[in-house]
Amino acid sequence: MQITLMAIGKTDSKELASLIDKYEKRLRRYIKFQLLVIPDLKNSKNLSESQQKEKEGALILAQIESSDVVVLLDEKGKSFTSMSFSNYLQKKMNSGLKRLVFVIGGPYGFGEEVYARCNEKISLSSMTFSHQMVRLFAIEQVYRAFTILRNEPYHHQ
């Protein structure tokens, strides 16, 4: 199985980019992983919120294959503990799935087309974080899940 984390726009913070890179490298020891960054929309200031979600949605959907399981990182999604998330990933791997795609939306979230295509929604927190921070949190949680599955001493209960 491959895990892809799809996000809109580049990471501006060098410190965050460095941490994201650190966890990407760690994660690749366990599974095939890809961080797929979709470039920011040009002239987004001239677009309404719904137009921006529609255009970003089209870019997201263009990267998704019909066999992908698509999981939106959405505040209204299902919450997990780190332990239950590791079990979730294990079940996905056991199912013979080819690619699991986690998607971080743009500043206004997702358009209806993306919601219609998704298979599941997961919430990292009921708090709001910057989209750049969410990348780090998502990659770290996937890494943590694999250390839990391997009984490695990263996660403490």
Image (cartoon, grey):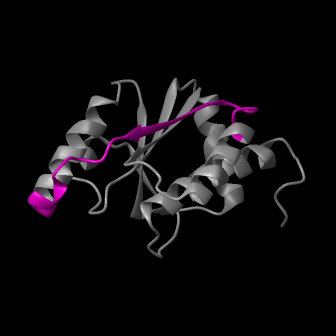
> Residue drawn 50% across and 28% down?
99
Residue 85 rendering spot, x and y as whole percentages = 63, 53
Residue 150 rendering spot, x and y as whole percentages = 83, 41
- Residue extent of the magenta highlight: 27-49
Q: Residue 84, located in which quarter of the rendered image?
A: bottom right
Residue 62 rendering spot, x and y as whole percentages = 27, 30
Residue 19 visible to the viewer = yes
Residue 28 is covered by the magenta coloring? yes
> Residue drawn 62% across and 42% down?
89
Q: Nearer the viewer, residue 63 or 70?
A: 63
Tell me if residue 75 comes above or below residue 139 in the rendering. Answer: below
> Residue drawn 39% across and 24% down?
67
Q: Residue 141, located in which quarter of the rendered image?
A: bottom right
Numbered marks: total: 0
> Residue drawn 27% across and 54% down?
110
Residue 47 visible to the viewer = no
